[in-house]
Image (cartoon, grey):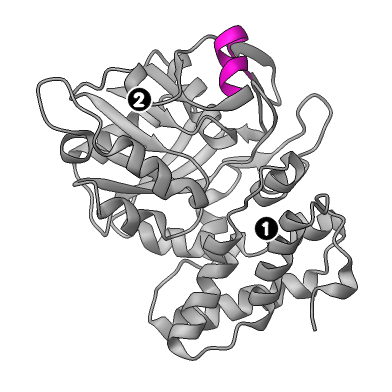
Amino acid sequence: MRYLIIGAGAVGGTIGVRLAEAGHDVTLVARGAHLDAIRAHGLTLATPEDERQVRLPAVAGPGEVELTPETVLVLTVKSQDTEAALGQWADAPVTGGGTAAERLPLLTAQNGVANEPAALRRFDRVYGVCLWLPATFLEPGVIAAEGHPHSGMLQLGRYPGGSDDTVRRIADELAKSGFVTRVRDDVMRWKYGKLLANLGNGLDALFGRDGDPGLAERLRAEGVAALAGAGIAHTSREEEAADRADNVRAHPVAGRTRAGSSTWQSLARGTGSTETDHLNGEIVLLGRLHGVPTPVNAAVQRAVHRAVREHIPAGAFPPDQLLP
């Protein structure tokens, strides 16, 4: 299989380099200064063990790459960029006829649970991926992959449910590329469990490591209640911990511990947007639909929007201004 990584940031860059090092044909999709750096110098992947610079083809869009029937699309952009990416790639032509949406499998290797239904509106075959992959992207052309002894753990399955030979083959190739993989018929149950774990990303972005653990528990409690109100199943912390075991732990890279969550990284880089609407906002939406109060998640969602709007640095939001 050939792999097209749509979004060569922390997650996409790590997956792309690992697949390429295992001998697979990989093309990265990036933009701006990051694309320029990859084209000029390759993508640098720093890990707890070493640092390597890998030369990979990098493109900005469909007009620069040939899609063959063997191509797998791996969507790794942040959730707020999903619609634009789907619109860009769905109608891309495939060698031999047809479009990417008609002929190619699409993997959603992203946080949140809204990407899969959005993708299925356009693509015939969508596969959800639940990620446990600690990585950092703060500098163009450089990714820190902090996962050890494996770079990440990926739960894969067909959306909305089930599995097939395609996902089993992809999982096998990822496993041979340095990841721990599981094929799940109920992959969305795992993704909803990961959503609960990601509700603290906004607190991390706002306050850094000084956030109130009590607030994090309140975020999760609201999330659990909202999912229960909607009748949505999710994995438990205990189930996730038992499955992950010691397969993936975040270790320092070049003497530096991981700076922060993916939402923290978006604020730190000043990207102008974050995935909070698809994390805390997902719980707020479910709460409003099913009559479950979610005031803390709503407060975090509003605060992150304010931090973006007012250019408040990552970790520097005034703690006394979060809750009314």
Please state if 241 lies on the left or on the right of 127 as rendered: right
Task: Read off the magenta span.
Answer: 34-44
Q: Earlier in the sequence, mark 1 or mark 2?
A: 2
Q: Is residue 271 above or below residue 159?
A: above
Residue 6 location, x and y as percent?
43, 33
Residue 141 location, x and y as percent?
64, 20
Q: Tally the numbered discs.
A: 2
Quadrant in which residue 35 is drawn: top right
Query: Residue 39: within the magenta?
Result: yes
Amino acid type at circle 1 is Asn
Overall secondary structure of the magenta stretch? helix
Q: Is residue 138 above or below residue 305?
A: above
Residue 58 location, x and y as percent?
47, 17
Name the disc covering residue 3, or none: 2
* 298 and 127: which is toward the camera: 298
Please state if 170 lies on the left or on the right of 221 as rendered: left
State the residue position of label 1.
201
Q: Residue at x 88, y 69 (%)?
A: 319
